[in-house]
Image (cartoon, rainbow, N blue to C red):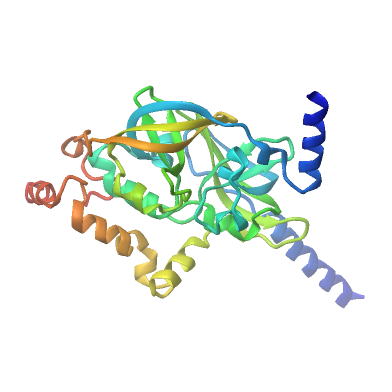
Amino acid sequence: MRKFALAALFAAALVQADDTRAAQEWGLIGEEIARFEAKVVDVLCELTGDCPAGCGKGRRQLGLLTDEGRLVLPVKNFTPFSGAVDELIDFCGKRVLADGLFTTNRGHTIYALQFVKELPDGKWRRANRFLPKWAKRFGFEPGGPEAKRWFRNDPRIKALVAEDGKLGLGPAADKKYFSEQ
Amino acid sequence: MRHLKTILLAAALAMGLSASALAAKGERVKLDGEVIDTWCYITEIMFAEGSAHHLCALWCAAGGIPVGILGDDGKVYMVLKIEDDATSVANPTVLKIQSHQVSVDGDLYVRDGINYLVVNQVRDDKGIVKINHDEWGIQPEGN
């Protein structure tokens, strides 16, 4: 009997741990924690009817379409300087439970996705899939120092900075600016 | 005619198309504005315009955060497509014009308070015109 009670308690703890996975406040202007059910959609498809297979396979912005017909735009995930598409693309066309923050400022309301799970009975995922995907794409270790500072090591960004400078005004402008710092 | 529309709608739904797949055309617009990172600008987590924010804007665009145009009217327009390229995640064309002042022709779709833009043509690209790094430094890490 005691064994059964302990097992039940352990199971309950696991369930609770799953259900208590909750979005954090980030201290943003006009932020509001929000957990809601929605269908993952390709935003361009939703608006224009231009609908390739697989929501554009991760190369298009994805939206969360609520049962009330509201189209929510998830702009951010849990990783520095990265968006929500890598977090949602596995759920294209599927219903999910999204957990995160709305932030309303400058006349716009956008969403930061922190956790997501497929409905009805998927497991919670922290919205931090961007980094391992980035690391795999560019040949770095997912937990390595290059991945942690991915934005400093991204070959696309490095190429643009080499060409246009960090200021975007050409290498000469960078040289002048940094020599004066 | 009304009867025909009903039949077509029913047929489309029967074929599995969502109502949104029958979406109407957007409103044709001409816009002037700066290509921006929408997250930093809307949240104001840092100063997010011009040369001061260019590097961060590159990071965010490469990271897949939606890129927008901050119109001269003060509104933000989320770019979903640029000319023939319907990709909007780390789009190389958009990365190349990040922080630039541009003039575009496009189709505007307003949905639930957000302006979405299909850019049909970039008519003009003046490069970065807000030269503000002396005032603001390089956001957010200073180098």
Give the residue drawn at x 45%, y 45%.
B66
Could you tell whether B21 is left or right of A160 in the image?
right
Give the answer, above or below, for where B31 lies relative to A22: above
Could you tell whether B52 is left or right of A64 in the image?
left
Q: Can residue A165 be spotted in the picture?
A: no
Instruction: Give coordinates of residue A71: x percent, y percent.
Output: 62, 38
Could you tell whether A116 is left or right of A135 in the image?
right
Give the residue drawn at x 81%, y 31%.
B6
Q: Nearer the viewer, residue B9 or A62?
A: B9
Instruction: Give coordinates of residue A177: x percent, y percent.
Output: 11, 46
Give the answer, above or below, for where A1 lies relative to A104: below
Q: Can residue A163 be spotted in the picture?
A: yes
Give the answer, above or below, for where A130 lies relative to A26: below
Instruction: Give coordinates of residue A60: x percent, y percent.
Output: 51, 51
In this view, the residue farthest toward the right is A1
Split into 4 quadrants, where in the image is the N terminus of chain B? top right
Give the residue drawn at x 72%, y 55%.
A19
Q: Nearer the viewer, residue B20 or A106?
A: B20
Number of marks in the rendered image: 0
Could you tell whether A57 is left or right of A36 in the image?
left
Give the residue drawn at x 66%, y 44%.
A35
In this view, the residue farthest toward the top is B73
Instruction: Give coordinates of residue B102: x percent, y percent.
Output: 30, 34
